[in-house]
Image (tube, rainbow, N blue to C red):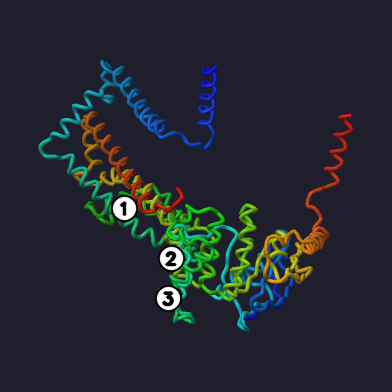
Amino acid sequence: MEVNAKRSKLALRWKSIWRLRSQIPWQISLLLTCFSFLLVLLWYIWKSESAVGNVSQSTFFPTVSEIVDGAVTIFTDEDKKVWTDIGTSAMRVFTGFLFAAVIAIPLGIYMGSYRIWEAFMQPIFEFIRYFPVPALIPLLVAIYGVDEESKIILIFLGTFFQLILMVADEVRRVSEELVKVAYTMGANSIEVLFKVLLPSALPGIFDALRLCHGWAWTYVVVAEMIATNEGLGIRIMKFARFVQMPKVMTYLLILGMLGLILDLLFRYINQKLFHWSKK
Amino acid sequence: MKLEVQNVSKIYQGRKKSIIALDSTSLTVNAGEFICFLGPSGCGKSTLLSTIGGLENPTGGKVLLDMEEVSEPTPEIGMVFQKYTLFPWMTVLENASFGKRLYCNGAKGQLENDRPKNLKKRAEKLLEMVGLAEFKNAYSKELSGGMQQRVAIARALANRPKVLLMDEPFCALDSQTREEMQEMILLLSRVEKTTVLFVTHDVEEAIFLGDRVFVFSARPGRVIREEKIPFDKDRKPDLKLSSEFLELKRSLLQELHKCHPPSFDREKLLTAIEKDHRSDS
């Protein structure tokens, strides 16, 4: 009897997990996350092990132990190239993204608040947003040369147009009543903008930063196609040219880890800064 | 204080046809009065309220507050909305002192001797009056709907408006909380000597709160009746059970039923039920 009761209770819980948007215990959520990583790992192990002996395939699917070897050589390298690569790429991402954020946030706020600015800027930005950034490289090189400048501008272009539209959307999402209430209490337009619209949209803007920041890391790899000797992107391309796949894999893992850590950092800061937000 | 609404009308211009949201309406409100606008949704009562608050411009006519035309929002006219409108990044106390803070910094310095220190005191006093003194450091996400509306009322009153506009503020609350809030706003309006214009679709609420009730009809929105409520200012929830109250309620409800036929097809549903009966037996 008791076993039956227990079983039906379990069945009930199992059912409730599949209800849309229902909460699940954090242990299960963590377990599932680990499971997904494990699945990818298992798939890779299977793929690489079955390629052993097949020359054309095993070159491109190094086994896990080969990757570990590659990683060890990379991290024990005397020139400490990997750290300069990370540093150089991070610097590029940071500078390009910083410029994009500094310009996109105020412009986006104005675009989301004033119909005049919206009509003036939104359509042209929507249009430019669809330009494939890698295709702009020749143009950038022609205008800005092959130095850091053109790389940073590439990252800027890759993130700015996305970011500004997202910021504007966040500002538009602020409830109309909040604006009205501020007006009826004597606020003028500038006060409504800075004391109501901006603080209200900030958590959303911060989240937009988190998402766009990810794209910046994609574009840094593209940007490093332009003449350079250091950086994660150019190193990957160099390794690939000499078919050093374990090292390519190591660098891909580094990129993934960096992204994950920064993403978590963004989320953490968001929670700390905007504890009042409902999310 | 005197508020005059002179021939105010509002027409929304659609592509094919225009909708008369509010037919030409005139009324005068004296200092200290509690006025209720009663009617179903879409009868223009909220439009009239927004127009009085300067949030919407009328198609025709004008609103005068102490002989001056109201064409944009002013701190003289406060407003409480149906939706919860607390600023979520501010504490309860910061919310409550929002209006006066702006007012003191702002250009319209009628209350210049109200220094920020007094302002905080005033906000605290109002929070005390609405019973939320101990929640002054809480954020809106920690508050229930009723509490949020109480803060919104305190915030509006702390600004010392001459007129307080309330757009179905208790509509989303459960009925017990609503009754409590009704009594509270009656007392608050007397303490603060504020004139209140209150929009509602609840007949009972309108009679309980109002010194005068304006009944609206929909399509086109217009005032079809003005009812002077014969009770004195001192009202308790028991009043709702008195025969005089119920008589008034009956009369107003009948008025509303008369000019608002049901929007569904009653005959069709009735015949459907009948058919069902016949096939059953």
- Neighbourhood count class around disc 2 (C-alpha, 10 Å): few under 14, some 14–19, many 20 upward: some
Q: Left of A180 or right of it: where is B11?
A: right
Judging from the image, what secondary structure is the residue with disc 1 in? helix
On the same chain: label 1 and label 2? yes
Amino acid type assigned to the residue bearing label 3 in the image: Asn
Of tags 1 and 3, the one toward the viewer is 3
Query: For the residues marked 1 and 2, what is the alpha-carbon distance in whole angstroms?
Result: 26 Å
Q: Residue B127 carries which label?
A: none
Q: Left of B200 or right of it: where is A56?
A: left
Q: Name the residue under label 3.
A: B105
- Neighbourhood count class around disc 1 (C-alpha, 10 Å): few under 14, some 14–19, many 20 upward: many
Question: Split into 4 quadrants, where in the image is the N terminus of chain B?
Answer: bottom right
Q: Name the residue under label 2.
A: A195
Examine the rendering and report whether any part of residue A21 can be seen: yes
Q: Which residue is drawn at 34% across and 26% down?
A: A38
In front of the other: B220 or B17: B220
Q: Which mark is residue A97?
A: 1
- Neighbourhood count class around disc 3 (C-alpha, 10 Å): few under 14, some 14–19, many 20 upward: few
Q: Which chain carries label 3?
A: B
Q: Mark 2 lies on which chain?
A: A
> Quick one: which residue is furthest to the left in this view?
A78
Locate residue B281, reporting x and y percent.
89, 29
